Image (spheres, rainbow, N blue to C red):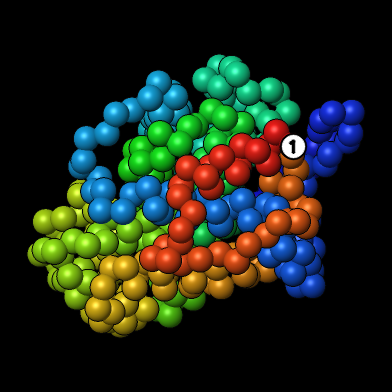
Amino acid sequence: MTDATTKILKFKGENMEFKTRVKTESDMNAWESSEAYDDYIGFIAAMNKSVYAIPLNKTLTQSNVISQLLNVLNTIDDWITEVEPLKESCRFGNKAFSTFYNLLKTRLPEVLCKELSSVDQQNIIELTAYIVDSFGNPTRIDYGTGHEMSFCMFLCGLYKVDVLKQSDSKATVNVLFSRYLEIVRRCQLRYQMEPAGSHGAWSLDDYQFVPFIWGSAQLIENPDLNPNLFVDEKCVQQFKSKYMFLGCIDFIMQVKKGLFHEHSNQLWNISGVQSWNKINEGLIKMYKKEVLGKFPIIQHVPFGNLFKFEPCVNKTPFAAPSVMKTPALSLLEKLKKTNQS
């Protein structure tokens, strides 16, 4: 989530800088105690809860705003088509990605202003920064979980400015986030993007993490697809379009060669867990530690009005989904109240 430009934003007569705040390892404690952290993990949990046992192919009623945001993503996909990869050999990513990234920076502000006309200009600036950064780094031509986090912050921000509603929760995951995955995978392949901060076989995945969380939620209480089946290639081909988790496994099988237990050891171990519920709980804990708890990722996150880098006064311990008693509605209501205060 790099290249976020520092801007001075004015809210209620005060100057509020939109900039990175985690400068050293010691700042990580402030991040984990901040309103921003509490809001973000609350959003991840709320979306997770909303798609329990809801496969991708389940028909959902889509609001006008979901359709508008889907149009934005489809427009971005068109820009990828517009920017052909360079034909010369590129050892570390195809430099045409930088051209595509510049299109995002120059064209997206106008597109978002048009589609999100109810949102004030200051918040449009922040939302634009998050979605632009969600497609990768134009200098290193890489992509990783920090960029994925940026897109989730974009979605969460849309709830905070009251563009997305609680009734949009399922479509936020199964329509918008699913479409985003298709687009960034296309980028990864088309522009030969490097994994950002990959740990190789010992990480969950070179590029993504959140779709494994929400994808495992889709499979909770599924009587026909036990966890040990997701490493079976026939099973993956049968269900990759129905379940986000299986779609992730399919992409890994496309881009990695060799035995699955060798190139994806963490996922191989997860396939031995007895239930999707336990996998879902474990992945959220792992996400907090391996992504939200890592300085190299959070150092690039900009904070401002939508995500405030201030101590969370009424912070409550995050509960795993199986014991979480707070419904998704109240979590999303909390986000809206935070924005209004």
- Coordinates of residue 257 in the picture (x, y in percent): 26, 72
Q: Residue furthest front?
A: 325
Instruction: Answer whether residue 59 is visible to the viewer in this image.
Output: yes
- Relative to 264, 132 lies left or right: right
Q: Find residue 32 and report its horizontal and vertical position in percent.
A: 68, 65
Rendered-image quadrant of the C terminus: top right
> In this figure, which residue is indicated by the disc labeled 1?
341
| Occupied quadrant, residue 232 | bottom left
Front residue (pair 137, 225): 225
Which residue: 22% across, 72% down?
227
Relative placement, left or right, of 337 versus 203 is right
Counting other residues with Cα less than 10 Å from the Cα at mark 1, is it few (<14), some (14-19), or many (20 or more)? few
- Give the secondary structure at mark 1: loop
Residue under the image location 34 percent in, 71 percent down: 279
**Along the viewing direction, whichever of 137 and 42 lies nearer the viewer:** 42
Depth order, front residue of 141/16: 16
Q: Is residue 106 visible?
A: no
The percent position of residue 193, horizontal first and vertical second, equals: 46, 55
Q: Position of residue 162 (x, y in %)?
A: 57, 30
Which amino acid type is shown beneath numbered disc 1? Ser
To which quarter of the image does residue 7 belong?
Answer: top right
Answer left or right for 10 relative to 172: right
